[in-house]
Amino acid sequence: MKRFLTFIILVLPVFFSLTMTSCQKETKEDDTYIVSGIQLPSSLDVYPGKTVKITVLGTPPAVGDEVLLVSSSGEKYAFPVSAVGDGSFSFVFDNEDMISGSYIFYLTRGTSGKKIGSVMINIVYDMDFTPDEGVTVYGVVTASNRPVQGVVVSDGYEVDVTDKDGVYQLESEKKHGYVFMSIPSGYNVGSDGIRPMFYKTLTESADKAERADFYLEAVDNNDYVLLVFGDMHLANRSETNDISQFYRFTNDLNDFLASNRGKNIYALTLGDMTWDLYWYDNNYTFSNYLSTMNTHIGDLQVFHTIGNHDHDMKAAGDWDTVVKYKKEIAPTYYSFNLGKYHYVVLDDILCTNTSGGASGDRHYVERITSEQIDWLKKDLAYVDKNTPVIVSTHAPLYRDNYLEPTTRLSDVRTLFNAFDGYEVHYLTGHTHRMLNVDKLESDGHFEHNAGAVCADWWWSYKESDILISTDGCPGGYSVFEISGTDMKWRYKATDFSDDYQFRTYDLNNVHITNDKYIPNATETQKKAFKNYVDAYPENKNNEVLINVWNWDPDWEINVIENGKELDVERVVAYDPLHIIAYTAKRLNRGGTTKATFPTDLNNHFFKVKASAPDTDLEITVTDRFGKPYTEIMERPKTFDIKTYLHE
């Protein structure tokens, strides 16, 4: 094997002098400098001493204008426009100081300039290298123009790790059509909008060797914040106005980002960012989703997990249903590292539809394929058992309708066995509800079924101005604060403060009846509503129901009445507010035999019995990290939608 790596940057002394002089000037953006239609790609592979060509659909710059590249830390690098014509302009890339990374791209003329956008500059080095026999994908991983050793790279089947020269090699069949890097701790990658670019699309046939390089930016990310976004279901539906509702979430999120400026912040979705039916019915596709996110969210890298509604059910089978996702969003399974944690993203939706979505054939099972398990074992071979792991899947591991959850994911024991010896936190979505299952001591894992951004598919806010899920959890997102291996988490309800962690009901006033809530319903609809009528008959037992959506067994709930602590009982219940804010309203409108996404049973409810109907209660809920949340509940407490709109 011949292996020589040569890192070459050619420098023209006269040009370097011009560049340094140019970088000292102050450039201002104004309307006197006119350029338009510049088609700036998200990523540019540039070769030292070579010409870079940029497409123009409108007004180009002139020869002698300058391309100004500004790094995230403020370094400026200028390159004169050397040629204009044929719908493009060109400049020669020659600079010995620049490193691969994210840059703001400006065009300037004198002291006037125009910001064009952000671009990932990938400096491609001359590589005198002959890959081993049988290798079909190879490349080099660098940071600050230097090779990085020990980076895991994979095509989803084969796994390799970079050597001292930063080189990896894969005998890949190129089945997925991409290769991805498991971003190492202490580094970031560039972005295409919200998407971190840790993978490269392969373009050659499976029998031809091709090169795919990766570029890293060193960063201290031992301390960071991970934002977790459960199901969004963006579809541009007129029935729910989901897009305008979504802006309430992005406004809340941007407020969070602004108040935490200076911190390392990343995000992770839990699947169902879109809704495949409406790719076709409303022409709202992955590209629309990305445009919405890129337009309304600030500088934030978002790692993605695939959900069942991100599969194209117009296709048939598990392979063809993910073609669009892999092309436009990300690999369906991969890994990366942030700080001291190793992250694994898996696809636990196995499509079994055989007729390409015809006749309602949208079948799938919730299971991790053996292909992924095989890859996972190879990936974990490079992860020390002392490294804590965070795993993201769409469908959850456990069911939430019982006090003691039972497993839900098919063949879940195979997944657990793959992580034997590791401490694992699973982040899951799909149900639009919240469930925490702490089995760290017994089985080494903790599941956070983490709620949904859209709550109940955006319906409840459309009906009642309350964004609430079928378990009573408000729509929102999870916040994980991580320092080293220490991790704290909380739930952030959209448009509410961090202190909004539970809701109380005076059951003396919660009386669900057909006549009051669904007077226009048919007999069939009344039958569908019967569970709620039975659950909340007239009750004068002075009971109070408390919904603590992010509860786990290490939380404490204390209720004081007239200086006396009351006994607290954990129960499985239906959330009363969701019943009247959504389920009843859908049934009362008629036209459907049942409410889609109706109120469901959940196990994060608690009940106390007071001594009288009009005593006030001091309710304190303390999370597992010792933070208390308190409500002085004035009783009697009215039960109607208005009471809970802004509590």
Image: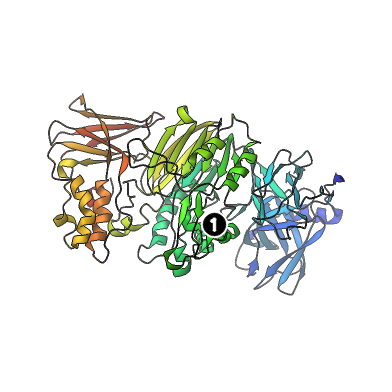
Q: Is residue 223 left or right of residue 56?
A: left
Q: Is residue 14 visible?
A: yes
Instruction: Please state the total of marks drawn on the protein image.
Output: 1
Mark 1: amino acid: Asp
Along the line of sight, the residue nearer the viewer: 451 or 38? 451
Q: Is residue 358 left or right of residue 161?
A: left
Along the line of sight, the residue nearer the viewer: 308 or 551? 308
Q: Which residue lies furthest to the front in this view?
A: 354
* In the rendered image, the vertical position of residue 558 relative to residue 290, given as above or below: above
Q: Quarter of the image containing the N terminus?
A: top right
Q: Where is residue 22 in the image (x, y as percent from the top left)?
A: 75, 56
Q: Which residue lies furthest to the top in this view?
A: 564
The quarter of the displayed image where residue 193 is located = bottom right
Along the line of sight, the residue nearer the viewer: 61 or 571? 571
Secondary element at tag 1: helix
Q: Quarter of the image containing the C terminus?
A: top left
The image's colour scheme reads rainbow
Q: Position of residue 642 (x, y in %)?
A: 23, 51
* In the rendered image, the vertical position of residue 27 relative to residue 610, given as above or below: below
Q: Where is residue 120 in the image (x, y as percent from the top left)?
A: 67, 54
Q: Can residue 24 be seen in this view?
A: no
Q: Position of residue 184 (x, y in %)?
A: 65, 40
Q: Is residue 136 left or right of residue 353?
A: right
What residue do we see at 49% from left, 42% from top? 411
Along the line of sight, the residue nearer the viewer: 249 or 600? 600
What residue do we see at 51% from left, 42% from top? 226
* In the rendered image, the vertical position of residue 58 relative to residue 569, given as above or below: below
Binning the other alpha carbons within 10 Å of mark 1 as few (below 14), some (14 to 19) or many (20 upward) gives some
* In the rendered image, the vertical position of residue 528 relative to residue 341, given as above or below: below
Find disc 1 in the rendering and name its residue.
318
